Amino acid sequence: MTEFPEGFLKGDTLTVAQGLIGALLFHQSTDGLAGGFIVETEAYLGSDDRASHASHGRTRRNETMFGPPGFAYIYLIYGMYNCLNVVTEPEGYPAAVLIRALEPSMGQDLMRRRRPRARREEELANGPGKLCQALGVEQGMNGWNLRTSALRLTPGRAAGEIGVGPRIGVDYAGPWTDQPWRFYELGNRNLSR
């Protein structure tokens, strides 16, 4: 299977966030294979970005963000939902791309078992917590290499037209709240709400 070149993931986070639209993200677990095409992302850029977990410096929680590019940074929100990020930029610079939504393309039956409240296929992975549930992404996968592990990121399909907007749920970040660092495939029915 084709891998993303490490050089791409080491690049500028905004470019990576746009370039991941259409990429394939999947998890081969003991339960089976589940995955889909990325249709929405958000960029988080370094310690100056007040919406970033790195804005208060290096901690045990955000340590993975400072590591090499192409690794999974997984954290818990609201004490119950995992969120998956792809670490970007050269090692030592804390930047990552949050994967906000997927268009399911494999293992939809497994995704439905993991997300029994989803009424339609478009609701299986249309949010960062939902996609982690659908793919079986857990805290123990934090720090996994997304180019070589069972949780894998590969080139996928060509993306449609890409929309740009402010990030979601970062109202606390002052002037960083309105940065247009969310990217999404226009017209895709699997986008987050």
Image (cartoon, rainbow, N blue to C red):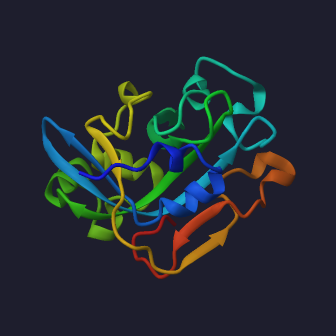
The relative height of residue 52 versus residue 112 in the rendered view (above or below) is above
Q: Nearer the viewer, residue 4 or 96?
A: 4
x and y percentages locating residue 9 in the rendered image: 52, 46
Q: Is residue 33 left or right of residue 2?
A: left
Expressed as whole percent of the image width and height from the top left, the position of residue 103 reads: 34, 66
Quadrant housing residue 47: top right
Residue 17 at x, y = what percent?
Answer: 57, 57
Tell me which residue sits at (23%, 51%) in the image. 1
Q: Nearer the viewer, residue 43 or 68?
A: 68
Which residue sits furthest top?
Answer: 60
Task: Establish if 120 lies above or below 76.
Answer: below
- Residue at 78% x, 41% y is 50
Residue 83 on image: x %, y %? 48, 42
Residue found at x 78% / y 61%: 178
32 lies left or right of 118: left
View extreme (right): residue: 175
**Position of 120 relative to 26 (above/below):** below
Q: Residue at x 39, y 33 (%)?
A: 145
Rendered position, 184 above or below 128: below
149 sits left or right of 65 in the view: left
